[in-house]
Image: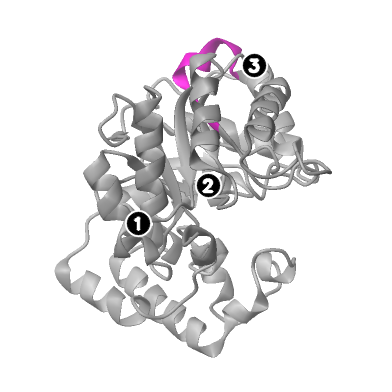
Amino acid sequence: MVYVPNEKRYESIEYRRCGDSGLSLPPISLGTWQNFGGGSVFETCRAIVRRAFDRGVTHFDLANMYGPPYGSAEENFGEILRKDFCERRDELVISTKAGYEMWSGPYGIGASKKYLIASIDQSLKRLGLDYVDIFYAHRPWPDVPMEETMGALAQIVKQGKALYIGISSYSPERTQKAFEVLKSEGVPLLIHQASYSMLNRHIETGLLDTLGELGVGCIAFSALAQGLLTDKYLDGEAEGGRASQGGSFSRDFLSKENLKHVRGLAAIARKRGQTLAQMAIAWVLRDPRVTSALIGARTVAQLDDSLDALKRMQFGDDELYEIDQYAKDGGIDLWREISLL
């Protein structure tokens, strides 16, 4: 069946300007980290993307190594673009990244010019695109000169392979330097992708201030703390969630102390008439320096639940205070070590 988008998709969403740039992004963007790889059901992925677009989501975030296997999320998303969005490319903001291991040998990982230039060419081929809207350095690499990394990113923009440049998980100091090196190349730094949630607040101790001062946007990933800030773990069981699958979510996150925090936050969400996931997303977006919250979804229903966070975005001072009692000094921080590099 031919996909016909919802004609009213732009009427119920308020887009947010990305830093000082002219680009606006939806307050919630769809990521493809966990659920778009080769092991996923293609038609489910396709239905999620269609539904997201029908609800005003215009930004879709990928990376070269998203899968598994590596590259398969880009391949699947590229197929969705070809089947459903050929005539709507200019309504989409598509981002991808490079930095983590992608292929064997010394040139398949890192932030060298050789790796980044090869990576963007491979990503464009998998996606079936002439350019992406945003290309990120996926993580900092202290042993690679900043001038080399940012110079390669600037070259990618000047060659027309990306419209904008982003970085991910950089410390405030490295963000400042990246901004300055890109500026010397005549290319602005558009956006920083950072982990941020009620249980993971390290960006509040400098990075958000730096981004605000530089006029750089922020897109927050893991607003749900990889699923910990949902109802699925309230009983302490890991079955059916990421904790049961291994990988980046450890069963250690389901400690008694963490679950105490999560249950307290869930009670606040219920009083607000929201699911815990909805409150977690709305909380991240309460700061105007955060342009967008990046979510994942395994099903259309899960996507809808997350997007419904936009129905109640405001917090009272008493609610924020109560949230802080459970979340400010307790929880997890999965990417702090990287971002301190």
Residue beneath disc 1 = 284
Quarter of image, res 214: top left
Pair 3/2: label in front: 2
Tell me if I can see residue 268 in this picture.
yes
Q: Nearer the viewer, residue 121 or 198?
A: 121
Residue 66: within the magenta?
Answer: no
Q: Which residues are magenta?
A: 85-95
Residue 94: within the magenta?
Answer: yes
Residue beneath disc 2 = 303
**For this view, does 22 lie left or right of residue 28?**
left
Outermost residue on the bottom side: it is 256
Q: How far apart are the alpha carbons under marks 2 and 1?
A: 17 Å
Proximity of marks 3 and 1: CB atoms separated by less than 8 Å: no
Tag 1, which secondary structure?
helix
User: Which sits earlier in the primary sequence, circle 3 or circle 1?
Assistant: 3
Image position, residue 303 (x, y; %): 53, 47
**In the image, residue 2 above or below residue 16:** above
Residue ID at (63%, 21%): 81
Q: Amino acid at mark 3?
A: Val
**For this view, does 211 lie left or right of residue 301?**
left
Pair 2/1: label in front: 1
